[in-house]
Image: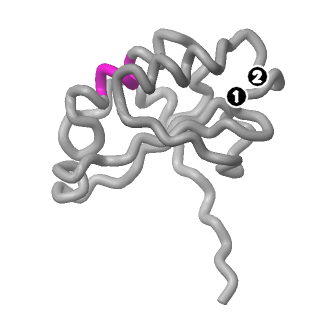
Amino acid sequence: MVCRDCCCGSPKVTGVDHAAQTARLRAEVPVRVSDCLDVCDQANVIVVQPSTAGRAAGARPVWLGLVNDPDATEDIVTWVRAGGPGVAPLPDILGLYAFTPPRRRTDP
């Protein structure tokens, strides 16, 4: 999932070809584009969802922030093609981008 709303994917994050980043990801892996994920301080945000095999292994989505470099995009593609969360270990370099999103408040 690629965040593309108020900050992510906008001119607020300078020096990034957001369209090229999204196109590169789409060329290799399934991509959903999301509205704001409410972590604008981490723009550009990409959330890597586990595959069916990854979910069966107990994996959770991995949130990656500040993905503003083409090399990071390539590292994500390589990891997802290798199986992603729960199947392939998170590469050390992507560990630098990983963060835990704040809990969202849910009203009854």
Q: Quadrant of the C terminus?
A: bottom right
Which residue lies at the image location 64% right of the left edge and 30% below the top edge?
A: 44
Marks 1 and 2 close (CB-CB < 8 Å): yes
Q: Residue furthest right?
A: 12
| 52 left or right of 41 in image | left
Amino acid type, callout 1 = Gly
**Where does the magenta region start and end?**
75-79
Amino acid type, callout 2 = Val
Disc 1 target residue: 9
Predominant SS of the magenta segment: helix
- Please determine whether, in this image, residue 50 is positioned above or below residue 31: below
- Mark 1: secondary structure: loop
| 75 left or right of 47 in image | left
Which residue lies at the image location 35% right of the left edge and 29% below the top edge?
A: 29
Which residue lies at the image location 82% right of the left edge and 25% below the top edge?
A: 12
- Please determine whether, in this image, residue 63 is positioned above or below residue 101: above
Q: Residue furthest bottom?
A: 108
Q: Which mark is residue 13?
A: 2
Residue 66 horizontal/vertical position (percent): 62, 27
Residue 31 horizontal/vertical position (percent): 45, 36
| 41 left or right of 3 in image | right
Which residue lies at the image location 58% right of the left edge and 14% below the top edge?
A: 20
Residue 100 horizontal/vertical position (percent): 53, 49
- Please determine whether, in this image, residue 69 is positioned above or below residue 61: above
Based on the picture, tell me whether residue 100 belongs to the magenta stretch.
no
